Image (cartoon, grey):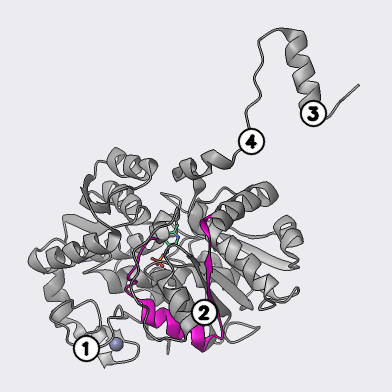
Amino acid sequence: MSVLDFLATNRRQLTCRRHGVIDNTEAPWSCSVCGATLRAAPDLTSVDIRADLDSRPHSMFRFRELLPIESEPRAGAYTGWTPLVKAHRLGGVLRLDNLYLKLDCYNWPTYSYKDRVVASALQRALELGATTVSCVSTGNVGNSVASMAAAVGLEAVIFYPAGLEPAKNVVSLVHGASVIELDGTFDEVNAICRRLAMDTDVPFVNLTLRPFYAEGAKTVSYEIVEQLGWLQPDHVVVPTAGAALITRLAYGFEEMSVLGVTSGPLMPRIHAAQASGCAPIANAFAAGKAVPAPVVPDTIAKSLAIGNPGDGSVALEVISDSSGSAQAVSDEHILAGIELLATTEGVYTEPAGGTAVAATRQLVESGAIAPDDVVVIIISGSGLKTQEVNAGVLGEISRSSTDYDTAKSLFLEKAGRHG
Ligand SMILES: *Cc1c(COP(=O)(O)O)cnc(C)c1O
Ligand SMILES: [Zn+2]
């Protein structure tokens, strides 16, 4: 069955959070009224996620009954269950006593949160009998699709906007994916891909399969809650682009609450972190608007450079329902955030993570976060794929000849052993 046939015949499983069952012939993965991605939401009435905890896998499929998959996971069997670490040294700088980092920069197999959503979508693609998959990406989705498609024997065709970080192209190509770069912004490439998704029978993991893709992101919140000892944190700071992550994080915390397994607040306050060069959600939040106005991105945070976020209005809704906020931070502060995280915690993140660190600093300074609040920052991707952004702000390499005495005096100087 083609994915479009599947979406047409399974409409009742897929609902808009606000508008219920929707028949959208233009883009059947989203609501025709508000544009939000439809939900493939779980039935929570007969779920006992704390049963047999010891025998459950330490992966994103730990609570697989909460995900829209029907068969044994083949894609992403090792994805998820990333470390949640207490950040003592960064917490010292930011004056936060209970600061945690959710390190999806160490996700399997391509070092970003996208490994979760792509695993969830590919699992569905396999269940529907697809042999080729496609996607539209700012970099990390393409990397996850390339790697995971190779591992399960699917062909992959990936669409990118121009000007992507070189390493992200390499990671896609080395796994044998076809990469198509269109000369435009992500939003322009996305518009083309939406048409292709409707005109052809190739499933796009983040368009046609988007309801299944997005649900995979809820696993970040399930893990945070369990790793905190079944506690809901007070605040979560989330790098935000198309807003699959921030909306599904909220749904994940909400599901844990409904299941009655958590202590602490019913829901954390959810804060979006955006680059000021591409802040449609933060702009709308500041202006008190319910729908973000599209922008043309101009920022070093390329994985966040979506000017017309698909789930932007739902993001604003979950932010306001949770008494959260949306922050915009400059590229300069993003770079400072990357460096601060690396030098205090030994974690090298890409600009998206630097954006979340900078936004957290801003929230502390404005008093929105109190010193003893339990705060989790989502570090959503690795700096190893975006090294060129740090080139201008690094320390210098010291050089010497191989003459022993020259090398020794340089060493003593650097090691602080003078005279
Ligand atoms: C895609 C991405 C995000 C934002 O995710 P959305 O679901 O599009 O909001 C954040 N961080 C990284 C590293 C990403 O690749
Ligand atoms: Zn709707």
Amino acid marked by disc 1: Ile
Front position among marks 3 and 4: 4
- On the image, the x and y values in percent for residue 325 come to 54, 79
Mark 2, residues whose alpha carbon is within 10 Å: few (<14), some, or many (≥20)? many
Q: What residue does disc 2 label?
A: 253
Q: Marks 3 and 4, how far apart in space?
A: 15 Å
The circle drawn on residue 415 is 3
Q: Are marks 3 and 1 in contact (CB under 8 Å)?
A: no
Q: What residue does disc 1 label?
A: 22
Q: Is residue 286 above or below residue 96?
A: below
- On the image, the x and y values in percent for residue 316 come to 44, 82
Left or right of 255? Residue 9 is: left
**Quarter of the image that includes the C terminus:** top right
Q: What residue is shown at x 47% (from left), y 67% (from top)?
A: 62
Q: What residue is shown at x 21% (from left), y 69% (from top)?
A: 208
Q: Earlier in the sequence, mark 2 or mark 1?
A: 1
Q: Are marks 4 and 1 in contact (CB under 8 Å)?
A: no
State which image quarter holds ligand 1: bottom left
Magenta span contains residue 327: yes
